[in-house]
Amino acid sequence: MIVRSLFLGLLMIAVATTSPAFAQQFGKPVIDEDSKSDAQPPRKAKPQKIPELTPPADWHTDLNSAKAAAAKSDKDVVLMFSAAWCGACRHVLTEVVGQDSVEKTLEEFEPVLINVDKDRSDARKYGVRGLPTFVFLNSSGKEIGRSVGAPAAPDRFVTMLKKRDSLQPAAPRKMITDEEAFKVADADANNEVNQNEFTHYVKSRLRNFPFSEQLFGMVDTNKSNTIDLDEFKMRNEALQKLFVELQKRRPQRQAPKKNDADS
């Protein structure tokens, strides 16, 4: 009788310790055999797309339209170079612009918002190096000043607008002429550029361009192994042809094939 009672007691303990309630209470993982086959691996979260910056209703989004409006209204133009990924730009447009003091001061301007990811030409033209960059033009389209960085408060933004005439405009870039570039390349000053001179010039100007020898062969039209000024002037056209040729040689990326499991 005692042995039977002891056996029944051990059997009840074994059943209790294998129950889900016991496992949940004492931290033992529970495997549901019915739902085991239906389990799926966790899905990776898709990266969220950064929303585009929305320009204020009375702002231009095209520089030409802003210049045309400024010529009629005799107002200065303020260009704000920005991008969707620029947090400081978003702060200015959502937290600063729209305040009463800022809106009142902006009435003296033709403001324009330029997205550097979509309008790279204007960004290059004005030498934009950081965001946001504010460039001020007079009604004739001439730059009178610029400011780099985000005025974090409305009063600072207003101060920047009012002191536009005292801001330092960008230093004009000096464009080197073909004649000046040829003199730089012509190290021995014999009015001809050999391959060594040409290679040294191209690599120093084009960030170690690796195909300078091939480019020399394209520029050297008379195959004299030297380049005169007329041939040197053609180097940009030859360089463009070389890039096109290299682009054709580059293997095209193929879209990954879908697995049977994904279809």
Image: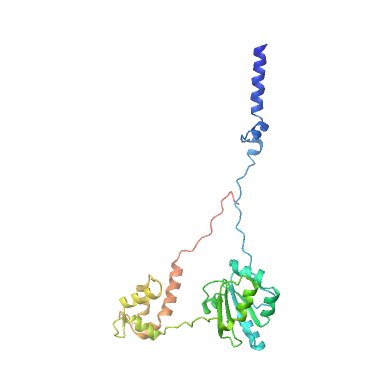
Query: Residue 62, located in which quarter of the rendered image?
Result: bottom right
Q: Is residue 109 above or below residue 34?
A: below
The residue that appears at 66% across and 12% down in the rendered structure is 2
Query: Residue 150, located in which quarter of the rendered image?
Result: bottom right
Q: Which quarter of the rendering shows the N terminus? A: top right
Q: Decide if residue 194 is on the left or right side of residue 96.
A: left
Q: How many marks?
A: 0
- Residue nearest the observer in this picture, 91 or 82: 91
Regarding residue 61, the answer to whether it shows in the image is: no
Image x and y of residue 177, in percent: 41, 85
- Residue nearest the observer in this picture, 230 or 162: 162
Image x and y of residue 260, in percent: 58, 50
The residue that appears at 67% across and 87% down in the rendered structure is 73
Q: Is residue 91 above or below residue 144?
A: above
Regarding residue 2, the answer to whether it shows in the image is: yes
Image x and y of residue 9, in percent: 66, 19
Task: Name the colouring of the figure.
Answer: rainbow
Query: Residue 240, located in which quarter of the rendered image?
Result: bottom left
- Residue nearest the observer in this picture, 167 or 77: 167
In the picture as drawn, the residue positioned furthest to the top comes out as 1
Q: Decide if residue 194 is on the left or right side of residue 209.
A: left
Image x and y of residue 72, in percent: 66, 88
